[in-house]
Amino acid sequence: MDPERAKYLSRIASQPEAKQKTRRYFEKPTPWGRELSVSEVIMNQGETPMKRLLVFATVVVVAVTASGLLLAQSNPFVGRWKLNLAKSKDTGAFPKEETLTVQLVGEQRQVTINGTGADGSPISFKYEVPDKGGAGKVLAGGPYDAVSGKRIDDNTREVSYMKGGKEVLQLRTAVSKDGNTMRLTVEGTDAQGKPFSGVAVFEKQ
């Protein structure tokens, strides 16, 4: 950089920060054709296009992450839920114990189910469906090969589980206004083809 230009930039940039925020520094016409603002001086002192690009990318990432966190916090289904058998009503088909973990991954509502079945067998199932409704997919475990969801309102969803192209289980899930209780109205057929129904009550942990 030309020594005179460097000296000029250094002299302006050294002014108190408070003054830099409240005024532009104008000197007599410079040898480079025009006067410089403080923002231009700061930009010219060590900030490269690559640095500006990295700063912009960081701001975008932070903004997207923050909006995602706010969206998750405002979604009443997100969280860890534990089955309360004492408050549930069923025909004997519910598991001995079960925990649901619900999280938002992008626009997908991802559900992880763990527990112990009525016969003592372990339960491990993971799937995801669009939070706005539509076809989802089974991610791991479980007796089903397809899943789909439907959004009824902010606090109510429906989920259908299929096996071999046939619906075998349907859930209507509703979260209370205080966000602490989730009721699952269940209708389906068991492994022997017998119909069952009930209401499972989950409490937020």
Image (cartoon, rainbow, N blue to C red):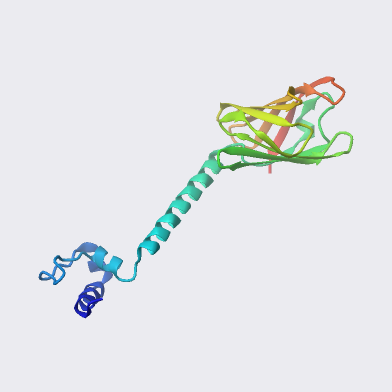
Give percent across and percent down for residue 6. 24, 76
Question: In the rendered view, would you say 7 is above or below 82?
Answer: below
Name which quarter of the figure residue 40 lies in: bottom left
Q: Residue at x 30, y 71 (%)?
A: 45
Q: Nearer the viewer, residue 166 or 104?
A: 166
Question: In the rendered view, would you say 25 is above or below 62?
Answer: below
Name which quarter of the figure residue 104 lies in: top right
Q: Nearer the viewer, residue 134 or 81?
A: 134
Q: Quadrant of the C terminus?
A: top right
Q: Residue at x 77, y 22 (%)?
A: 188
Give percent across and percent down for residue 46. 34, 71
Q: Quadrant of the N terminus?
A: bottom left
Q: Residue furthest left?
A: 28
Q: Going by the image, does 48 lie left or right of 125?
A: left
Give percent across and percent down for residue 185. 71, 25
Q: Going by the image, does 37 lie left or right of 184?
A: left
Q: Going by the image, does 169 lie left or right of 156?
A: right
Q: Going by the image, does 145 lie left or right of 25?
A: right
Q: Residue at x 60, y 28 (%)?
A: 134
Q: Residue at x 71, y 30 (%)?
A: 146
Give percent across and percent down for residue 135. 63, 29
Q: Residue furthest right?
A: 119
Q: Residue furthest top?
A: 195
Count of marks, rendered view = 0
Question: In the rendered view, would you say 9 is above or below 55?
Answer: below
Q: Nearer the viewer, residue 9 or 175?
A: 9
